[in-house]
Each structure stands twice: as structure tokens, then as C-alpha cells.
Image (tube, rainbow, N blue to C red):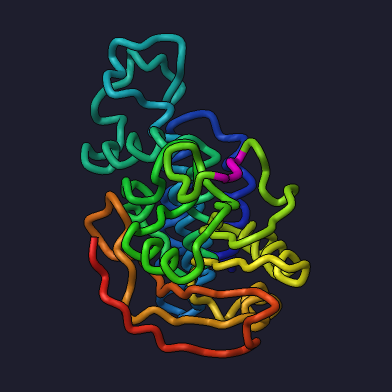
Amino acid sequence: MTTAIQKLTQAEKWLSEAKTLDDLQQIHDIAVAAEAYAKAHRLGIAAENHAMEVRLLAGRRIGELVPATPARVKGRRAHGKELSEVRTTDLPEKQRLSEFRKLAQIPLPQFKERIEHLKEQSEKLNYKKMVTTDWYQSSETPEWPTPQWLFDLLDREFHFTLDVCATKDNAKCVHFYTRQDNGLEQQWSGKCWMNPPYGREIAEWMTKAKESAKAGATVVCLVPARPDTDWWWENALAGEIRFIRGRLKWPGSNTMAPFPSAVVVLGNHVKPRKVVWWEVSQTS
């Protein structure tokens, strides 16, 4: 007997080749069944997220395939028919189709980044988290913006001279590196501020911070508090760790961050593995 999880593996392979609405709806339904199976059999969040990832990808493809006014668009097919011939009954229910269209509005690279970020944070994938506008401070960067009050507090202590990971709009220092400069390839010296991208590449930024600290720089890093990860153990423990009480509220967001944060201070003058329970007031 083929389990829902086995069907999901087949559907995932089929996803890249599917071209009709029928195919994509079938893949979506298989993913829904696989997610329910994973929950019922307590297979864990990884299995549930795998099913939800396929479900979201299929939904996004449906949203691309069926524009907001299908009757007026020709030259694309759904259910083996020109979209101008598709009846309302051929399409997913209105609310679900609206969600699919919103997913389709997210550029694919950002769409995949959001999925990877949630999985890395052990967050449960769902539609709402995928379409929230709080993910990016701009369309050019996957970084979470730095709360100004927090930077000001640390700047009074360290007097920063370089922002190693910034954009022209959000740079915190006169001297800064943008994505185009690729801060990972630049020399870091003096008192450095770092609020890195929070995806998989965070390991590279933390490694660079530790190496720069060994070479004489002071690097103050705002990162997710993730002692369950390799990058944390390999890099954060080389410096002073300040665990921030509660969760930060990011500029432009109406909600708190979905993860706890910490400030990691790396430098030759810093005592390694020093832990501070940092109870600071969040003021805008």
C-alpha cells in the first residue's frame, strides 16, 4: 500500500513538469493529504513542512496559471482548455484561488528564501507566514531591519565605524558595505556593526565576524538566538553573548519577531563564552 508520504515524493517530482490546472490541483491535494498523514502519525515538523512546502509551491503555480481575470486572457491553458474557455466551476474555490494568486506575486527566489528561513527556524510553514509583508525591509535585501533604539544603545557603548552588511537606505554607519560590495570579501576593521541575512548564509557571516575579531576588529552581531545550530556553537561561543529578554519588534512591523534575538560581541578584548541576560527596554 502506497502511503501519503510516498505519494508526496512522487508528486514533488511531478511538480516541475505539471502544466495544467488539473495536474497542479492534484499535486496540491496530495500534499494536503500528506500533511494530514504526518500530523496523524506524529512524524514531526520536518515531515509536515515538507508536505506544506509542496502544497505552497503547487498553489503558487496555480496562482501563476490562473490570472485574476481568466476569461480575458488567451494563449495559456488550464484543464486542457484555453483560459478563455475555463468555467468558474473548473477553478479552485474563490478564497483558495485568492491565496494562490498572492503566493504567485512573491518572486520565486524570495518565495524559496522564506520557506528555507522558516524551516531553519523550526517554524511551521503556512500561508499567512509566507505572504506577510514583514519579511523584508525592502525588495533588495533579506535582512531584518535593525531597531534604531537597539543600535543607538550599542553605538553609545562601542562607537561603531563600519556597517558590514547594509543597504544605502538602512546603513547605520558612514562607512558601510552593501550587497554589491559583498562584505564577506571585504576587510573588516575597527568597531563593526553586523545585522546579517538570517537565512543559511548567516553561518558565513558569523565565521567572517569571528575571523575579523581574531585579526583585531571588534564585531557586534545582532542574530537569532539559535544555540541549536552549528554556526552558533562554532562562532558565537567565541565572544560575549547577550540574550535579549522577550522578542524584538522590527521597524515597519506590527508584530514581534518569530524568534528570540541575541547580541554577540566578538573581539580580542572580549571574554569568550561570557553570557549576559540582557534586560533592556524596547523603545522606538
Q: The N terminus is located in which quarter?
A: bottom right
Q: Main secondary structure of the magenta part?
A: loop
Whether the magenta-drawn stretch holds residue 178 is answered as yes
Q: Position of residue 233 (x, y in %)?
A: 66, 81
Q: Looking at the picture, how far across and down is residue 11, in whole percent?
A: 57, 49
Please state if 125 lies on the left or on the right of 228 as rendered: left
Residue closer to the observer: 55 or 232: 232
Camera-nearest residue between 19 and 205: 205
Figure quadrant of the C terminus:
bottom left
Q: Residue at x 43, y 27 (%)?
A: 65
Using residue 99 as the reference point, say whether residue 239 is left or right of it: right
- Residue drawn at 40 percent across, 9 percent down: 74
Residue 94 in the magenta stretch? The answer is no
Q: Position of residue 32 (x, y in %)?
A: 41, 57
- Residue at 51%, 64% (x, y): give it: 119
Q: Is residue 27 shown above or below 238? A: above
- In the image, the segment drawn in magenta is 175-179
Q: Is residue 120 visible?
A: yes
Q: Which residue does the image show at 74% across and 52% down from the upper left? A: 187
